[in-house]
Image (cartoon, grey):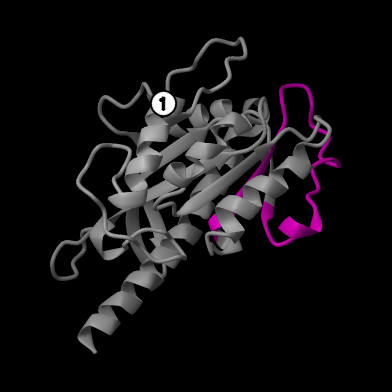
Amino acid sequence: MIKLLPDSRDARFYNVQDLAKLTDMSESANVSPQGDEPKTKGTRSGRRSVLGHVKMSGQRSNIPEMFKVKVLVLGPCESGKTVLSNFLADATEMSGDYMPTQGVRILEFENNGLNVGGRTVNAEVELWDCSGDHKFEQCWPAIQQETNGVLLVFNPDQPNHDKELETWYSHFVSQQGMKDSQCLAFAHHKPSTSDKARGHLSSLLSKVTVVHSNIDEDGDSVRQEFSNFLTNILSTMSDNRDKEELSIIS
């Protein structure tokens, strides 16, 4: 079940100037883009302090736990990142004309009733729809902070899109010590183009799951694949939390 958070139907935007300031601040204070108090530096596998970002109900009960999850949506320009992000978040649709994202858009919504290790949990998702323009590369350190998962989006009908993913994967997944289970690639097909023979990734991304997405023809499958992806992320976060709790006890 996906629930849009109140007053979040229109995404928050951060331009290059905003992100540059955040990059400078993050080097000294690790301040979040939302302007919250400085956050505790997290583990490499999630870049987020799990204990500090999981709403616990005190003792274990039948009330589902709520996890806060930050997912980056990355890929080349004109690959369909914004269309996919809006669809997953049930956000207000934008103009049909192509409008390149300047900096990053942040959409917030809930995905509830996920099964993680036999337990039902809820996820409060921040979906960061990032510009594919490399002029924002100086802002990547601010964008990548406290990331739990990465969606790579490419258009299999565009030449070299699959090759461009290697850069995004190397920087945001491999170099950050994230697991391949925390990464999912969408071969985003535009309407009337569904050649699934295309869309194979290079050997560098051989362990990353590739999903062929066509929102108009099979939107339910796209949502289900995203929910499965969130379940993988939450399993990693839950394991890390349990390890931290054990280390505190011991």
At x 52% / y 38%, what residue is drawn? 138
At x 72% / y 22%, what residue is drawn? 191
Say which of 95 and 161 sits in front.
161
Residues shaded magenta: 182-209
User: Residue 96: image x %, image y %?
Assistant: 59, 11
Q: Quadrant of residue 153?
A: top right
Taking 74 as reference, is 40 left or right? left
Please determine whether, in this image, residue 117 is positioned above or below residue 153: below
Asked if residue 197 is among those painted magenta in the image, a careful observer would answer yes
At x 50% / y 14%, what residue is drawn? 94
Asked if residue 55 is among those painted magenta in the image, a careful observer would answer no
Say which of 205 and 181 sits in front.
205
Residue 143 in sight from this viewpoint: yes
Per the image, the residue denoted by label 1 is: 17
Q: Amino acid at mark 1?
A: Gln
Q: Quadrant of residue 154?
A: top right
Taking 241 as reference, is 225 left or right? right
